[in-house]
Amino acid sequence: MTEQDQKQLGATLWRIADDLRGAMNADDFRDYMLSFLFLRYLSDNYEAAAQKELGSDYRPLIEWYRDHPNDTAQFEKQMNRKLHYVIAPDYLWGNIAHLARTHSADLLSTLQKGFKYIEEDSFEGTFSGLFSEINLASEKLGKTQTERNKLLCTVVGKLDEGMTKFSTRVDVLGDAYEYLIGQFAAGSGKKAGEFYTPQQMSTILSRLVVLDAQDPTTGARAKLNKVLDFACGSGSLLLNVRQQLGEHGIGKIYGQEKNITTYNLARMNMLLHGVKDSEFAIFHGDSLLNQWDEFGEPNPAKKLKFEAIVANPPFSLKWEPTDALADDFRFKDYGLAPKSAADFAFLLHGFHYLADDGTMAIILPHGVLFRGGAEARIRTKLLKDGHIDTVIGLPANLFYSTGIPVCILVLKRCKKSDDVLFINAAEHFEKGKRQNKLLPEHIDKIVATYQYRQEEPRYARRVTMAEIEANDFNLNISRYVSTAVAEESIDLAVVHERLSEVELQIMHAKKRHNGFLRELGLPELL
């Protein structure tokens, strides 16, 4: 499928969503739309595997089950072994779409049973709770069961019709899913920050962390054993890291997400992009409270370590730092972030799990660069310990959720250089109607500047620790890389000479003009 076809599929699906959601909030309709797309993927994947398994005996599975009642248990065992899940024929997309096209009164109940079956009976909890936020009995779909069934028939029917002419390969459906997430984010305003990092931002972070930590000039690493995003939203950042290295370039992907709906989006997103359930672990819980048992090991020799960490946590989130958290192994060496802004708490959480040969890139508001108090103490220790490698300032209005300019901090445990690279990319963007955009050339310039640690007037500069210390460990980018254009110096002697030449030219011109006036008998100019 061409890139144009992929965009057309995404646009087709978005048009269906936009036409059919009616008065329903975009966030609510998103969950229905994306769940149906995911069911389509599961079904297509399952039927393709069934066709290989059954060979010449393959036919629609509803018919095969009817004709082979004694063979279904062995068949499902084989499917479990190959795919790690099973879908009963009644709940496959083909049957669901048939019920929708025929306006069957059974569609609603079949979908309800199907989602429950996939969550509970499919295979060893692979999809446990995946559709927990999809309420098919909600009055948002209609006041009566008949009205809800009618709307679902329309939505499923249009979705099936819209996708008929497009490929159902996993990468295609994954791209369509990502496109829809982005479109819904665009319509969600401030809520979008809860689940979506724009692709241009994802690309910058992912390209930075896949480079060799000690010597980025050597290029991307061949493989990363573990990658983490501890505020993963819909998982787009993690998938972008995977895309940079290819499907075999990462040992295992780890993500954590507090919002249950977004957590389910991330799991679907992984599977829709061909990431096997054994290749990722997405956990529902609060990273600040470290609600993931795997991350609870305080022994540095035994703790999880990641070669790449990316994150776009909620900006300046209010939190409750307790006495217990003050003794937490993630924070005790640095102190707690203030309750007014958890930015450094998120940073320290991730940094604790960074491997010695790893790179962490995190998006934060500019306040972390210069705010005082507890944040100044944390920032100062990170700098003195040599862990802050690069500070990148970005343009304003890049996010759906906020118009403020943000920065990227790149951190390392064992960095090679003893200075800090400042990149001021705030003026390099394309202005848009709703959001500004970073074009590929803007992204390439940021990455190349970081990779080769290049200096460029009004754009990038390597700053010594002595200079940073002289500035009280304030990292405000404009202190080190000014974008102001210096006023041109004026040489008064040159200006005087030029004015004298102009005066002489005026005198000669006036004398010649008066000569013409005399010939014509007209009064001369004084």
Image (spheres, rainbow, N blue to C red):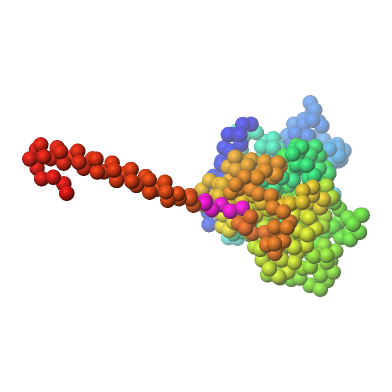
Q: Position of residue 121 (x, y in %)?
A: 81, 50
Asked whether residue 333 is in view, the answer is yes
Quadrant housing residue 312: bottom right
Residue 178 against residue 318 in the figure, above or below: above
Q: Quadrant of the N terminus?
A: top right
Residue 76 against residue 369 in the figure, above or below: above
Quadrant housing residue 87: top right
Judging depth in this view, the residue of 445 and 228 nearest the camera is 445
Judging depth in this view, the residue of 329 and 125 nearest the camera is 329
Q: Residue furthest left?
A: 521
Judged left or right of residue 488, residue 368 is right
Q: Residue at x 59, y 40 (%)?
A: 441
Q: Is residue 484 magenta?
A: yes
Quadrant housing residue 76: top right
Magenta part mainly helix, strand or loop? loop
Magenta-drawn segment: 481-486
Q: Residue at x 66, y 63 (%)?
A: 370
Asked whether residue 291 is in view, the answer is no
Q: Position of residue 211 (x, y in %)?
A: 75, 42
Q: Position of residue 483 (x, y in %)?
A: 56, 52
Number of numbered callouts drawn: 0
Q: Residue at x 14, y 37 (%)?
A: 516
Q: Position of residue 484 (x, y in %)?
A: 54, 53
Q: Is residue 373 magenta?
A: no
Q: Residue at x 77, y 68 (%)?
A: 336
